[in-house]
């Protein structure tokens, strides 16, 4: 487990010792609390974060192979305190527009 100002996360994989707490804390947004798994990878020196639900976690290896830069650092975290009920206002507005 790793402790951050956001909360505790379980490190599933840390390729090349890539997890840097300060980078993660600076890049994390509340929207990501709805995901049980987070993938962080560095591209051009910047951290990118992508969230996955439990049902989509099987696609993490595909994401790493297809979207992460070749031979770049990445890590996979499990968020034991994820908020599966998180609602984003923009998501709700978009859904309302699409269903009317």
Image (cartoon, grey):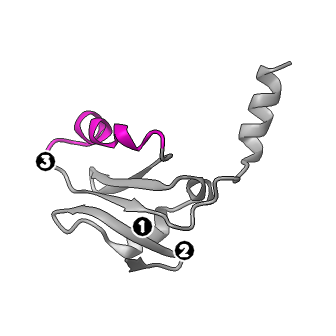
Q: Is residue 26 magenta?
A: no
The quadrant the C terminus occupies is top right
Q: Which mark is residue 14?
A: none
Q: Residue furthest front?
A: 55
| Callout 2: SS | loop
Q: Which residues are magenta?
A: 55-71
Q: Front-most of 19 and 34?
A: 34
The earlier-in-sequence mark between 2 and 3 is: 2
| Residue 99 drawn at (x, y percent) | 81, 20
* Residue behind mark 3: 71
Q: Which mark is residue 6?
A: 2
* Horizontal arrangement in the rendering, residue 78 relative to residue 16 (left or right): right
* Residue behind mark 1: 24
* Mark 2 surroundings within 10 Å by alpha-carbon count, few (fewer than 14), some (14 through 19), many (20 or more): few
Q: How many marks?
A: 3
* Horizontal arrangement in the rendering, residue 72 relative to residue 79 (left or right): left
Q: Residue at 80% across / 35% down in the picture? A: 93
The earlier-in-sequence mark between 3 and 1 is: 1
The earlier-in-sequence mark between 2 and 1 is: 2
Q: Is residue 56 magenta?
A: yes
Instruction: Classify 79 as above or below 49.
Output: below
Question: Mostly what secondary structure, the magenta segment?
Answer: helix
| Callout 3: SS | loop
* Mark 3 surroundings within 10 Å by alpha-carbon count, few (fewer than 14), some (14 through 19), many (20 or more): few
């Amino acid at each position: 487990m790793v402790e951050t100002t956001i909360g505790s996360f379980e490190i599933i994989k840390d390729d090349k010792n890539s997890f840097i707490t300060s980078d993660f804390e600076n890049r994390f947004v509340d929207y990501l609390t709805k995901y049980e798994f987070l993938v962080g990878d560095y591209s051009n020196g910047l951290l990118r974060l992508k969230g996955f639900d439990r049902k989509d976690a099987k696609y993490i290896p595909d994401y790493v192979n297809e979207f992460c830069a070749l031979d770049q650092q990445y890590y996979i975290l499990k968020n034991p305190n994820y908020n599966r009920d998180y609602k984003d206002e923009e998501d709700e507005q978009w859904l309302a527009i699409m269903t009317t």
